[in-house]
Image (tube, rainbow, N blue to C red):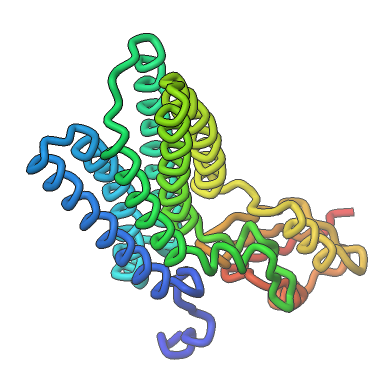
Amino acid sequence: MHSHSIAQWTHGHAFLGEHHGRHERRTWSVVTLTALMMVAEITGGTLFGSIALVADGWHMATHVAALAIAGLAYLFARRHADDARFSLGTGKFGDLAAFASAVILGMIALGIGYESILRLLHPVAIHFQEAVPIAGLGLCVNLASAWLLRDDHDHDHGHHHAGGAPDMAQRDSNLRAAYIHVLADALTSVLAICGLSAAWAFGWTFMDPVVGLVGTAVIASWAFGLVRTAGGVLLDTVPDPRLAQRIRQHMEIDGDRLADLHVWQLGPGHAAVIASVVSDRPQAPAVYKQRLDAVDGLSHVTVEVNACPH
């Protein structure tokens, strides 16, 4: 058989998200914005002798690192989309980056919690006049960053394509991880402003570490959710039970039965299927593949057909 005669049966394995390029550009914009804020805080804090400013700058550095991981994952996935070494494409790089980001986020939460407990046990003098504006400036940068990363995160969740691909398979974990990092920083700023304002106005110095512990709990729960989602994709869990159910409904007709079914996510909006069909009247695999044309988001389908021995 000549190589050109099999061309119609071969296909690419670039399973990147539909908005990969746009997400990549926005992520790098947020990395730049956050890095500039970090440099400004560390430089300003060093020049004006403000420990609070320097500390916030180094805290911002951890988010710059996590956001840069997201940006590099987009870059690497795009650059190696057609690399034959990645037999099922590079669509999971985003989930690998999201998992790493979630671990960093969890460590940040633990750090805030540890610092808050220390402050509760050993209260320190707070320089309110410099601390509140720093938190306010940080919040402005976070809100601008969240606005840059928002759009597909918010809209894709409630939106189904005509074929009804479930939300989980559409989700870009990498963008979501970057968005949650920015959101976590914004929450920290809001809580800091509330705690510092209460301490400044009423002399309740304990409020600053108390809101720090609230932030720890919220950010840790976000980090855990992100670990579970990204880890699920990395471990090839079924992206959505409804998707597996729809595949069964389309395949198990005319007495045909599925003896084995594997469904997993290759990248945002791309799922793979390996199905083993048992039939009294077996047909060509192409017939069974055609039944799945109505299910959106299936980018790599392999069908094995077995004749029922009885």
Please state the horizontal and vertical placement of residue 29, each as a whole percent of the image: 31, 67
Count of residue discs: 0
The residue positioned farthest toward the left in the image shown: 47
Q: Quadrant of the C terminus?
A: bottom right
Q: Is residue 310 left or right of residue 34?
A: right
Is residue 239 visible in the rendered image? The answer is yes
The residue positioned farthest toward the top in the image shown: 121
Residue occupying image coordinates x 41% and y 21%: 205
Closer-to-camera residue (17/87): 17
Please state the horizontal and vertical placement of residue 237, each as a whole percent of the image: 61, 46
Please state the horizontal and vertical placement of residue 136, each as a whole percent of the image: 37, 49
Q: Report which quarter residue 113 is drawn in.
A: top left
Q: Is residue 179 left or right of residue 66?
A: right
Vertical position of residue 43 compared to residue 11: above or below: above
Residue occupying image coordinates x 52% and y 29%: 214
Q: Is residue 90 left or right of residue 49?
A: right
Q: Is residue 66 left or right of residue 292?
A: left
Residue occupying image coordinates x 51% and y 74%: 18
Vertical position of residue 11 compared to residue 226: above or below: below
Residue occupying image coordinates x 45% and y 59%: 146
Vertical position of residue 152 compared to residue 233: above or below: below
Closer-to-camera residue (132/61): 132
The residue positioned farthest toward the front in the image shown: 201
Closer-to-camera residue (43/257): 43
Please state the horizontal and vertical placement of residue 54, each as a whole percent of the image: 19, 38
Is residue 287 visible in the rendered image? The answer is no
Closer-to-camera residue (179/23): 179
